[in-house]
Image (spheres, rainbow, N blue to C red):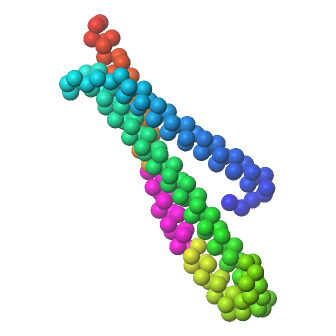
Amino acid sequence: MGGTERSVDEHRGYLEDANKLEYFITGVAGALAGYIGQDLRVTSLVLGGTTMELAALACFAGSFLSGVWRLQLSVHLRGMNAQKLSQHEIAGNALDTGLKGPGYSSEGQIFTQPQLLQRAVDANKTAAELERRLSRISDRTLFWYRVRNALLYGGMALLVVARLLPAIGRA
């Protein structure tokens, strides 16, 4: 992300807050699965409160697993993004040095001008491939975000209905 130091700091703060929220929501889904699962005793699978609690448990467990998978993909995405940025820096340094003539790379190695220019081309190709892979992984993280949230909301709805069914049956 380009921009001023202030905008970079704001974006960094946004990412930190988004990560905290991800961990919190995933943790809540896992805690809800544990809470329901600790006392759940299913005797038969007939439509009723216990069956709905079992379905809610499955939703919360699925939400937790989806959240963990999304977190893992996000970490992988961030690492690949760092690799891509590194390749762009290598290309920029090689091109800058190569246009001035033979010289040193940022890593301290001595290269001829054609070697530096080829190094810039190779680094740009690697960065382009990483960008394609980043796009696919980014799409997958969005998919797992939606799955996690849908299962979490579905589990909450099932749990509310399961807890209300006994009260409705007595009325």
Q: Which of the pair 81/170 is nearer the observer? A: 81
Question: Whole-percent x and y of residue 145?
Answer: 47, 46
143 vs 75, left or right, is: left
The quadrant in which residue 3 appears is bottom right
Region rendered in magenta: 128-143
Q: Which of the pair 44/17 is nearer the observer? A: 44
Is 115 one of the magenta-colored residues? no
Question: Which residue is painted at 65% across and 82% down in the image?
Answer: 120
Question: Which residue is painted at 20% across and 24% down in the image?
Answer: 44
Q: Quadrant of the N terminus?
A: bottom right
Q: Give the overall secondary structure of the magenta segment.
A: helix
Q: Which of the pair 157/80 is nearer the observer? A: 80
Question: Whole-percent x and y of residue 129?
Answer: 52, 73
Say above or below: 54 vs 169: below
Is 137 one of the magenta-colored residues? yes
161 vs 64, left or right, is: left
